[in-house]
């Protein structure tokens, strides 16, 4: 585990001297099988893998769950050691945001399409800033991000292109529970009843994707899907069909490939998910 920038730089220059390739997997800890799948994918793409663990205050709004966010550091380290992760990079808030910190990256394009950004207005600036810093600190050849956060994957891909960062962004498929619920650190918040209801999100997404692929009108399919999500006890933030590449709105399957994206709250927990069409 590395906790200071000079120690990180020492590890990096050792690897670079040996011509090792480096992959980075950024996380906020509370690791589950979805994160570990990212690490395994990273290990196939590079000789050395860095997993960062940093709960990034800048991407939480004041009313969000920064303080309650699950922290399972000892278990995270054990799981990563098990996978032979080369370095766990654990910067402090002081390293990431030193006193006087005054620079933010405010992404546009896929960060302003009216999905997560409509409900979490400062979220992608927080993500873009911390990801840019992690990429500059670690100079990885590859960085792996989950499709679970589909809009975030698009934002980061654009960021790297726009800032000429020499890292290839790789997307990893969503890892799910047997009943379809996408793994998420926030699933730990769910009560037994909420946990029972939670797979509704994926079931509705899958049903809608099937109907849209079969040629049924997007609007009416999504209307029905929204009603099913609400009937299950969720407060729906959005259920939308978008172009998979640009996240632009669509009206017909003919504009495909499409992605269906959902965000909904149950009790105090906000869940997101998406599927391809
Ligand atoms: P987080 O710690 O929640 O910020 O997530 C760190 C990385 O893991 C992000 O790239 C997420 O998209 C990814 N991730 C989270 N959950 C899953 C999942 N169920 N399947 C695949 N990737 C995931």
Image: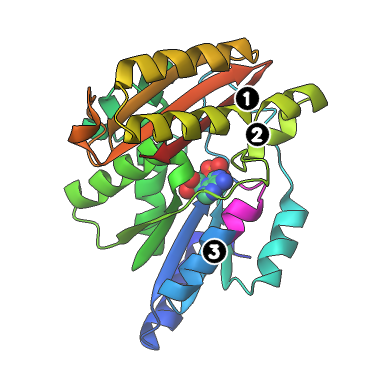
Is the N terminus in the top left, top right, bottom left or bottom right quadrant? bottom right
Q: Secondary structure at mark 1?
A: loop
Q: Quadrant of residue 228?
A: top right
N-term mark: 3 or 1: 3
The residue carrying mark 1 is 65
Mark 3 close to ligand 1, CB under 8 Å? no
Q: Residue at x 49, y 35 (%)?
A: 206
Q: Residue at x 45, y 36 (%)?
A: 274
Badge 1 density bin: few <14, some 14–19, many ≥20, Cα 10 Å? some
N-term mark: 2 or 1: 1
The residue carrying mark 3 is 39
Where does residue 208 sit, x and y in percent of width and height? 43, 28
Q: Are marks 2 and 1 in contact (CB under 8 Å)?
A: yes
Q: Residue at x 26, y 32 (%)?
A: 247
**Which region of the structure is painted magenta?**
29-36
Q: CA distance from mark 3 to mark 1?
A: 25 Å
Task: Depth check: give the residue in front, 273 or 21.
Answer: 273
Residue 186: numbered disc: 2
């Amino acid at each position: 585990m590395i906790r200071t920038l000079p120690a990180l730089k020492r590890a990096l220059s050792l690897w670079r001297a040996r011509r090792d390739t480096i992959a980075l997997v950024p996380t906020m800890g509370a690791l589950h099988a979805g994160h570990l799948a990212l690490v395994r994918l990273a290990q196939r793409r590079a000789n050395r893998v860095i997993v960062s663990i940093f709960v990034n205050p800048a991407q939480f709004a004041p009313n969000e769950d920064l303080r309650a966010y699950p922290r399972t550091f000892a278990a995270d380290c054990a799981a990563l050691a098990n996978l032979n992760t080369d370095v766990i990079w654990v910067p402090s808030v002081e390293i990431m945001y030193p006193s006087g910190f005054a620079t933010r990256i405010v992404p546009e394009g896929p960060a302003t399409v009216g999905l997560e950004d409509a409900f979490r207005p400062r979220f992608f600036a927080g993500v873009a800033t911390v990801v840019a810093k992690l990429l500059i600190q670690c100079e990885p050849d590859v960085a792996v991000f989950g499709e679970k956060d589909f809009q975030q994957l698009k934002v980061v891909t654009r960021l790297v292109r726009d800032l000429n960062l020499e890292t290839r962004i790789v997307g990893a498929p969503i890892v799910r529970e047997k009943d379809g619920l996408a793994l998420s650190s926030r699933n730990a918040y769910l009560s037994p009843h909420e946990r029972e209801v939670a797979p509704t999100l994926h079931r509705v997404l899958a049903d809608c994707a099937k109907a849209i692929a079969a040629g049924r009108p997007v609007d009416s399919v999504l209307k029905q899907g929204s009603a099913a999500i609400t009937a299950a006890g969720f407060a729906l933030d959005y259920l939308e069909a978008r172009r998979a590449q640009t996240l632009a709105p669509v009206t017909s399957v003919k504009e495909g490939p499409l992605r269906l994206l959902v965000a909904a709250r149950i009790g105090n927990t906000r869940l997101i998910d998406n599927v391809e069409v």
